[in-house]
Amino acid sequence: MKNIVLAIVIVAAAAFGFTYLKKSKEAASAANEALNSRETTAKVETKDINFVVTVSGEITPEKQVSVRPEVNGLILELPVDIGDKVKKDQLLFALDDKNIRIEIEQRQTQIDAANLQLEKARRNFERDRKLYQENLVSKEAFENTETEFSLAKNNIERAQKDLDLAMERLDKTQILAPFDCTILTRPVSAGQAVSGSGGFNSGTEVLTIADLNRMIINAHVNQADVSRLSVGLKVDIQVEAIAGLVVEGTVERIAPQATIVNGIKGFSARILLNKIDPRIQPGMTANIKIPVQSAAGVTAVPLGAVFTEYNEQLKKQERFVYVQNGNTFERRVVQIGVADYFFAEILSGLNSGETVSLEQPPLESIVESGNAPGNLASNPS
């Protein structure tokens, strides 16, 4: 029995080993085929090069307000709801003003009574002043009458201020739209008691409103790229949630001080959307393409064809390419202009249609073109 089990194990191991060896050979063959099929040369061509830096940001309204009442009260009217478009000075909500109106009536009654008291005190003061001038009343009696007259004037001034404050609170029960806006949120309903902004937690938020006709993006630009930004610069904006939509924006402001966001030091930049597509909504993520360099119709090669080495004689870094000529490669110094992540502009040293190597050729196939070989070249640059 043990011999049978041992035989089965040996057969299984042999089968596994054969399968593994076969798959390893197939993988190695596929890798070699991919390596052999990789392009090792490229043609010098004429093309446009546009180098842009992309940063992300969130679209927000330029004007967004959390609407809170200034006084405590009960919401009596709330005629707007989420998504409603409201004109400036249109009613957003109103508080129950019954108690304030009762208070105003009481203040008015107090003023009427204070006016009567003032008139009486004025008559007594005028009478006692004449009597005092004729030495018919004592100085103390005259001074008491004068004090009562002053107190009566103070009382009516205080009553008038109390009435003015009550009238001001009455005006604050009607909350109007400060600008043309859209209702973004409405966390409360009619009949709910709310606190004023001078109270606990700065008052109850009744609505959030925003002007959706002017939208901005607050983006965090890496400190290495912010020098390429300037106020007034036009940028292209892609909205992730809307496929194919590209709108133009203008850089409005660049923060004068760096901040660190997600471990990256950069500067806050505000970009204004020049034209608002109706599909754009607050909170959407946008990618801003910041133009860095561009060149149209220039001689260009893939970036991988440009090598760099340090020239001991010139004491500086030197750029060069390997130009194919049959089975040999000519090492040729070039000048680089505009470059992006894929292509580099050739200002001098190459002509359109020539073929360049994308990798270091064998040393025996390299032909110098009057340039002394420097240190070992590095690629790409």
Image (cartoon, helix red, strand yellow):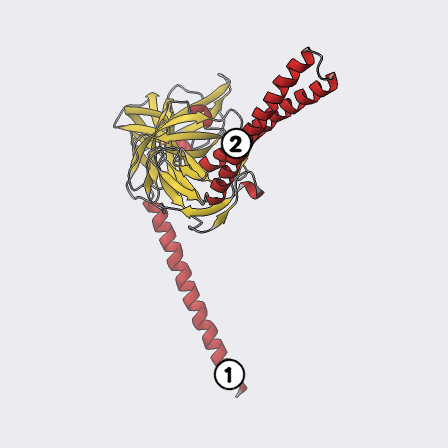
Query: Quadrant of residue 246 in the image?
Result: top left
Residue drawn at x 52%, y 35% is: 109
Which residue lies most toward the top here? 134
Residue drawn at x 60%, y 28% is: 155
Which numbered mark, 2 or 1, is in the foreground of this view?
2
Q: Nearer the viewer, residue 197 or 370?
A: 197
Number of dots carrying numbers:
2
Number of the label disc, if any, that sits on residue 5: 1
Identify the residue under disc 2: 112
Which residue lies most toward the bottom here? 1
Quadrant where the C terminus sits is: top left
Residue drawn at x 41%, y 67% is: 19
Residue drawn at x 48%, y 73% is: 13
Q: Looking at the image, is 367 positioned above or below residue 4?
A: above
The answer to which of marks 2 and 1 sits earlier in the sequence is 1
Q: Nearer the viewer, residue 108 or 272?
A: 108
Q: Nearer the viewer, residue 118 or 359?
A: 118
Question: Percent position (x, y) of residue 322?
Answer: 36, 29
Q: Residues within 10 Å of mark 2 (few under 14, many from 20)?
A: some
Type of amino acid at the residue the image marks with label 2: Asp
Question: Percent position (x, y) of residue 38?
Answer: 34, 43
Describe the element under mark 2 as helix, strand or loop: helix
Describe the element under mark 1 as helix, strand or loop: helix
Q: Looking at the image, is 139 positioned above or below residue 324?
A: above
Type of amino acid at the residue the image marks with label 1: Val
Q: CA distance from mark 2 to mark 1?
A: 117 Å
Question: Percent position (x, y) of residue 102?
Answer: 49, 42
Q: Is residue 39 visible?
A: no
